[in-house]
């Protein structure tokens, strides 16, 4: 009961717990951008505030018509999945340099993104869609997800998002196969694209985006890539040999951050300073937001307007998923070069392997070409985590 009450507290109630950044000469890294806390404190806070912040909500339409009307106490990892995916959509449609300023009029693309996460059944990445898609993968509504499960569910939901037209790849077995990613991202160009336009336009009449949202780059040579890598970096505690590599991931311009946290308490990590991770916390309950008649969304509650939370890297639960966004093939090639350089870092243990071709020990092809009507449940089963997050354990 005490935990339940704590979960419904608001950040205004807990504001005294949030400290400003320490006065340090060490850089503050936020999703690939370095800042000096001594001279750029306002810029840091503006960058953090500009990330979309999804928290527990209450009084939204019942999930499935008769299910819960709040996700307090169970939806934290689902909200973190929304945050990392929203960052991908921001990079896709607004760019990494985009900033949210309170009271400033935003573009239609911004509201299109926000509308895709609103708590209603017909939004692409709503809590309703994530929870119900998870049912088909053995997760009952109201059951806690791990990083791998939410990544896999978001991947399936993204196939319906014709406006963003993303290639979503979940790298399993601690291995990123470059050949598979290139095939996925270039498959858009190889298919006959002209026939897709009529269906795409009708798709935009529901599922998150208002009529009139434009479909762009449908026949581009490279589909923008969202790469999510579920990992387990130890048994019960994070192996300190991975800490430097984890920090390096936040320094890459392609970084989408990390979803993870502490046992049964998920956070969205967006950067670090010194030996502390910087994160957005979904553990506060806010009233559900309803769009107005003109599709304008009251958006202040979707932006964290106080200094972000911090925690020691050593406290991180070893189950995480690392995210990256590569808008172009050049971005992906650059990311590959950075990952290869990481292997040369002294005292740093690689968190995953980067290979050109699929290793022979892989038992089945990647599930990256799933379509909304895929039904090969047996083939999919091994790619979804179980109750205890059944990852391969990385070791020295």
Image (cartoon, grey):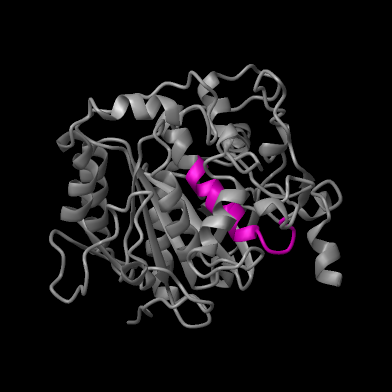
Does residue 5 appear in this view? yes
Q: In this view, does 211 lie above or below 131?
A: above
Quadrant of the image containing the N terminus = bottom right
Q: Residue 72: within the magenta?
A: yes
Question: Where residue 329 sits in the image (x, y, percent)?
Answer: 22, 38
**Viewer-proximal residue, 272 or 137?**
137
- Which residues make up the magenta segment? 71-86
| Residue 218 against residue 32 in the figure, above or below | above
Residue 285 as seen in the image, left or right of residue 151? right
Depth check, front residue: 30 or 169: 169
Image coords of residue 206 (percent x, y): 53, 32
Horizontal side of 377 relative to 18 (left or right) equals left
In front here: 200 or 365?
Answer: 200
| Camera-nearest residue between 69 and 26 | 69
Q: What residue do we see at 36% from left, 78% from top? A: 392
The residue located at (47%, 22%) in the rendering is 213
**Residue 53 in the image, given as x and y percentages of width and height:** 63, 43
Residue 94 rendering spot, x and y as whole percentages:
46, 27
């Amino acid at each position: 009961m005490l935990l339940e009450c704590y979960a419904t507290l608001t950040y205004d109630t807990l504001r005294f717990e949030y400290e400003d950044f320490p006065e340090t000469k060490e850089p503050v890294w936020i999703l690939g951008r370095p800042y000096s806390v001594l001279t750029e404190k306002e810029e840091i806070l503006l960058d953090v505030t500009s990330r979309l912040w999804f928290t527990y909500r209450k009084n939204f339409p019942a999930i499935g018509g008769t299910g819960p009307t709040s996700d307090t106490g169970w939806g934290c990892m689902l909200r973190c999945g929304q945050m990392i995916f929203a960052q991908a959509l921001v990079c896709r449609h607004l760019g990494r340099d985009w900033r949210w300023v309170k009271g400033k009029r935003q573009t239609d693309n911004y509201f299109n993104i926000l509308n895709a996460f609103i708590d209603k059944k017909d939004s692409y990445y709503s809590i309703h869609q994530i929870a119900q898609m998870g049912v088909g993968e053995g997760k009952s509504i109201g059951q806690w997800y791990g990083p791998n499960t939410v990544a896999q569910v978001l991947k399936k939901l993204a196939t319906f998002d014709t406006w963003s037209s993303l290639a979503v790849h979940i790298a399993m077995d601690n291995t990123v196969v470059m050949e598979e990613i290139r095939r996925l991202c270039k498959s858009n160009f190889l298919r006959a694209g002209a026939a897709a336009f009529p269906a795409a336009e009708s798709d935009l009449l529901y599922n998150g985006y208002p009529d009139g949202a434009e479909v762009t780059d449908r026949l581009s040579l490279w589909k923008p890539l969202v790469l999510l890598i579920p990992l387990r970096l130890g048994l019960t505690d994070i192996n300190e040999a991975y800490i430097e590599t984890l920090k390096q991931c936040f320094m890459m311009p392609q970084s989408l951050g990390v979803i993870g946290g502490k046992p049964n308490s998920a956070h969205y990590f967006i950067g670090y300073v010194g030996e502390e991770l910087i994160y957005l916390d979904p553990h506060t309950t806010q009233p559900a937001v309803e769009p107005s008649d003109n599709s304008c969304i009251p958006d202040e509650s979707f932006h964290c307007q106080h200094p972000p939370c911090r925690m020691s890297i050593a406290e991180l639960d070893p189950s995480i998923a690392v995210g990256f966004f590569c808008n172009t093939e050049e971005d992906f090639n650059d990311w590959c070069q950075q990952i290869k350089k990481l292997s040369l870092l002294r005292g740093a243990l690689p968190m995953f392997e980067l290979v050109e071709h699929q290793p022979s020990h892989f038992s089945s092809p990647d599930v990256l070409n799933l379509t909304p009507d895929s039904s090969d449940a047996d083939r999919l089963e091994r790619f979804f985590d179980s109750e205890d997050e059944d990852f391969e354990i990385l070791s020295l």
